[in-house]
Amino acid sequence: MKQKNFLARTPVLVIGALICCALWGGAFPAIKVGYQMFGIASDDTGAQIIFAGCRFILAGLLAQLIGSLIYGEILYPKFKNLKMVLVLALLQTTAQYFFFYIGLAHTTGVKASIVEALNVFVALLVAALLFRQEKLTVRKILGCILGFAGVVIVNLSGSGFDFDMTFLGEGCIFLSTIAYAFSSVCIKKYSQYERPFTLSAFQFMIGGLLLILVGIGVWDSKHMMGENADRKYVSSIFKAAQNQSHLFTKNAVLILFLLAGISAIAYSLWGLLLKYNEVSRVAVFGFLTPIFGVLFSTIFLLEESVSSTETIVTALVLVSVGTLMVQWRNKKEED
């Protein structure tokens, strides 16, 4: 019998996925704090995309550093695998976050979180029906439905939900989930040829650079063009932090590095988990990310209206049961 890889063991998968989701959930309040420190307005999509681009370039550098220390050599992709890196950069970083920020600017955070949670369903369908990486079963579908119900419950307790849908709002958020789903199955496929840390590092750097270029274009269309243009330059994003005290500027830089570190560690670990497990086994944990986001927002953003304890517990139970359903089926197949 072929020995199972360490990362394919259920306890290791659970702990690793929980770490990733907790890190991503913690990124939500950290991003908001970063916006405040850099003086980025909630409706300034161009500045937000530029901020994300800077974050991911730093994340790429950190991922390369961490991976190089782990493997004892400087990581860089083989020339023949550069196409894989570019595909991931376009899907996982550029397209996913471009559509997400555009959509977020045209809808509420509640609806964005609910639509974004559909990425688990889309990832399962793409992996099973298009890439044939696993079987689509009733148990997996039911597990995803329970997990999605948990995300809906924890978000519906807040404000900002209605059934009005627009392409620039919910449509772009859904396109973001599609980009994420395809990037997940691509990571599983490409990690057979290149180390996940290498893929993460260089797709972050390339994707981050592309995001900065796209963000500058969005910024120019708002601040430099048209009758209402205020002729505000991109450099003002960082001047907002520089105009504050030395400690404030230092904290702003630390927040940016914290966000970069979150991405570097979480996406690299997620890539390792995808390499040795079915996409559905890993992706289903994604339902926990918005719940962690609510928990961390409760702790660090006390002024925000958050869900009640009962609502969070109910959501956690639904997500946990749904996740166990997906994991139990895979365990039975292993036996």
Image (tube, grey):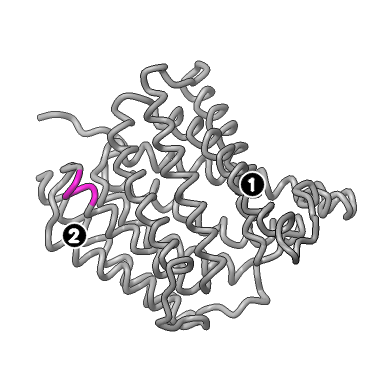
Name the residue rendered at 49%, 21% in the picture. Answer: 75
- Given the current orientation, which residue lies at the most extreme front position? 227
Label 1: how many residues lie within 10 Å, few (<14), some (14-19) or many (20+)? some
User: Based on the displayed image, in which of its 4 quarters is residue 310 positioned?
Assistant: bottom left
Write down the residue under mark 1.
Answer: 258
Q: Is residue 116 magenta?
A: no
What is the secondary structure assignment of the residue under circle 2? helix
Residue 51 versus residue 188: which sits nearer the camera?
51
What is the secondary structure assignment of the residue under circle 1? helix
> Which amino acid, mark 1?
Leu
Which quadrant: the N terminus? top left
Number of numbered discs overlaid on the protein picture:
2
Percent from the top left, x then y, of residue 20?
A: 45, 49
Which quadrant: the C terminus? top left
Name the residue rendered at 46%, 35% in the picture. Answer: 200
> Which amino acid, mark 2?
Lys
Horizontal arrangement in the rendering, residue 182 relative to residue 313 (left or right): left
Percent from the top left, x then y, of residue 239?
A: 83, 50
Write down the residue under mark 2.
Answer: 140
**What span is in magenta?**
126-130
Residue 64 versus residue 114: which sits nearer the camera?
114
